[in-house]
Image (cartoon, grey):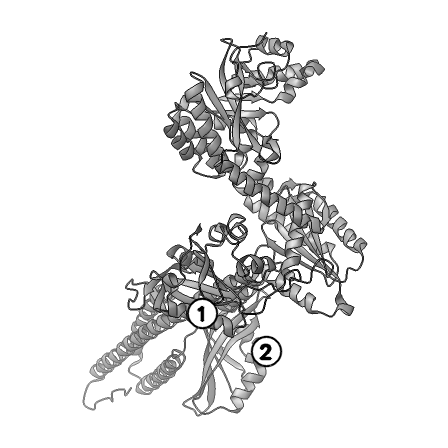
Amino acid sequence: MNLPVLTPGVSDTEQTKRLISNVFSYIVSLLVGIFIIAIISLLVIRNNVNSISDKHDEFLLKKALDIHQENIRSHLKDNAEWGDAYKNLHEKINLNWAWDKQNLGKSLYDNFGYEGVFVLSPEGITRYSVLDGNLRLQDLDSWLGKSTRENLLKEVSNNNGMPVSALTLIDSVPAIVSAAWITADNDSSVITRPGKFSIMLFIEKLTAEKLLAIGDDSGIKNVRVLPDAMRSQAENFVDFPLNINKGAVRIAWESENPGQALIIYFLPLLILSVVLMACMTIVLMRHIMQKARINDEHTFLLDQARLKLITSEKRFRDVSETTSDWLWETDLSLKIIWLSERFSTVTGFDNSEWTGRYLHELFPSRKASFLECISQREASGQFAFKNCPYINSQQSTSYCTLLAKFVVQPDGTVVIRGAATDVTIEVEATKRVQFLSRHDELTGLPNRYQIKEFLAGELNKDEAGHYPFSMICLDLDKFKPVNDVFGHSTGDALLGEVSSRLKGCIRSGDFVARQGGDEFMILLANTSQISQIDDVCQRIVNELNRPFSVNGNDVTIGVSMGIALAPKDSNSANDLLRFADIALYQAKQSGRNKWVYYQQDMSEKLTERRKMESELRTAIKEDQLYLVYQPRFNLKNSKVDAVEALVRWQHPERGNLMPDQFIPLAEETGLIINLSNWVLHKACTDALEKLPGLSVSVNISPVEFQASDLAERVKAILQATGLAPARLEIEVTENVTLSEPEKTSQIMKALKQMGVRILIDDFGTGYASLSYLRKFQFDGLKLDKSFIFSMGDSQQNLSVVEKIIDLGKAYSMEVTAEGVETAEQLNFLKNNKCDEVQGYFIGKPVAISELSLSLAD
């Protein structure tokens, strides 16, 4: 910039005005130029920030998809490397083992979302398939195409039968296909035959819902899939191509757009700075006007102002070439000369505290790299250091990426100017992804993947130094009521406390992990004596039986443990896991707070249980079940006006079975829905055809209230049978109010709106409170027979029965007394205004043809 020269022959006033006018024009132009450069730089920075954010999201999405494939391969390996699978899927196709017993059936669709499960012969022919949770034999080529199948089988062969996976398109939807040979692994009980192996495939479609869930897990919004030819048209969406078999697709997601926040934050500050500088310029010009008569001073001030503006402009231009959070400048010895104000905001340190100190004091781990870079520098050369760690003012570790360049100043000296971008969030996110792939997020314990790694390592160690070792599977007793009563946040906190106590019970070199839910696992190394294992188990029982104080609540739980020993029980990791689970199941069946060692006959008992499950499924289909009816006598009108339907099982081998012998099994296996549907349909049909005018009551398990379609099922059965809803009564225990009470209340309201009545069965033996009686508005209360049996023991027991009857009346409920067996009990209940009675004195449960509807003398 050249300042105007004073013109001879012109008055001082005119020269001053002309000079000020010219100077003012130059300054305004300079400010406008700086403002434009700043705006352009801000836009470039915004675009760079958005680009970095989008690349980071793309990395997380690709990493999440890779982890998803790895999980499918791991799950496939568990199922394919299994001696039973070799016998029942390779040597022959055993549908009973695969489908009926759900070893390779509908549970893979329900629990893991696998839309396709295939077993191919060694020649590649489909021998077994489960599609969308249904058993349906379909050629694999119709799903994948012949070329895709051949390429996949070739990759499996090249990988020596270990699981491989690939991405492909199925009905225009991307899908993960994983394949592996079916082998016996290390199962010594299976005799393998020479020749090629059968192949097992798992196929999971990456539907829109699954992609959204994968994105949500990575903190990325609205993940979706687009055809490769289509680009996302939404303003705030970005995408990247995903190469797969049979074409390509694009994965799109909603960009976080952090650069926009940068614009919103800095633009007003920039405008304000320009306004302030304009005001200062006006003041300066007025000051110059006053001092304009002194030519020498005026020229000196203008020269100084010009030099400062040039230096400031050059500094701003140099550092604006980099993307930054805070700016810095050092000499060639790395002594800090200048720091921007953002340094204090980002690091928490005061600028003056670090000015004059060395840059490598802030980043000590990079000192050698800094010095090497300076020693090899070239004039105006640039350099960068990524993810430099430093300790901030909060004494925690943060990370910066440094970008800088060598700058030659007007006086010939060389300085280093640069910018530091905070990348702490990105670095920690990467570390967290790596941690979560091998650890449980809630407790920080190793997860199932790391369990298998540890097991494989132990099994590969030499016998002299490390054998034997023990595997303990733990399951917490009474944990579900904690979640139901106190909430899931308390349950999560309790799991954290449990993990801490478990780590305190084991020795150095032992291993504790969480499998999921309330299940944990402990591996004890070098346990040559059973007493050593017993000591650890006793410590665990003692520790977990001590009350927990969680979120202000005192919680008491227990623990059951199953133990498998290596090499005594097996040398296979999969077998040890399975044997420990079987022993755990036996421990829970034989009582709580116990540990049980695996025995060979336990597998036989589990097989027997699975056999009974299959037989119950057959019994429901083939009408081996039948109903008996017990009358309910109305004391107000002295007649039987209702009956209770009770189910029995005429087993072809075991004879007549009572409900307590198969109802718990039905609840555990999910057969309770089919069983309940059969009972409801049969009871409604009998009531309509053979019990005119009488109501019929049916017991419904609390488990069924977790199925949201209970009301729809009852409505459909009433419509199919033609029975009036007012003649159907549903009996439930008090415990139905504990699990998801809001959902249970909605189901009960829907039933009552139909006209169906709801009774509390076995009242006084569960957990219902008075608030639940008021909230759920039951129609009737059935007093448990234990109260009736004990009436003759004391006056206090009689008083309890009276008070329960009064309680039912207070809530406008009809009160029924169960277990009435004597005339004295009947007279007492009648005198105390009990509405109905039921028991052997009235009538035993009998077939409908033998039902008596009058009170015996």
Residue 390 quadrant: bottom right
Image mark for residue 365: 2
Lower sequence index among marks 2 and 1: 1
Location of residue 506 in the rendering, given as x and y in whole percent from the top left corner:
73, 57
Q: What is the secondary structure assignment of the residue under circle 2?
A: helix
| Residue type indicated by callout 2 | Ser
Crowding at mark 2 (Cα within 10 Å: few <14, some 14-19, many 20+): few
Drawn side of residue 384 relative to residue 650, left or right: left
Location of residue 531 in the rendering, given as x and y in whole percent from the top left corner:
81, 53
Give the total of numbered labels: 2
Real-space Cα distance between discs 2 and 1? 47 Å
| Residue type indicated by callout 1 | Leu
Q: Nearer the viewer, mark 2 or mark 1?
A: 1
Of residue 2 and residue 750, the one placed in the foreground of this image is 750
Crowding at mark 1 (Cα within 10 Å: few <14, some 14-19, many 20+): many
Of residue 362 and residue 695, the one placed in the foreground of this image is 695
Location of residue 275 in the rendering, given as x and y in whole percent from the top left corner:
31, 68
Of residue 795 and residue 758, the one placed in the foreground of this image is 758
* Residue 553 seen anywhere in this rendered image of the structure: yes
Check contact, mark 2 vs mark 1: CB within 8 A: no
* Residue 257 seen anywhere in this rendered image of the structure: no
For residue 805, above or below residue 88: above
Q: Residue at x 20, y 91 (%)?
A: 8
Location of residue 699 in the rendering, given as x and y in whole percent from the top left corner:
52, 28
Q: Label 1, on which residue?
A: 152
Residue lying at the far left of the rendered structure: 9
For residue 727, above or below residue 158: above
Quadrant location of the N terminus in the rendered image: bottom left
Q: What is the secondary structure assignment of the residue under circle 1?
A: helix
Of residue 299 and residue 633, the one placed in the foreground of this image is 633
Quadrant location of the C terminus in the rendered image: top right
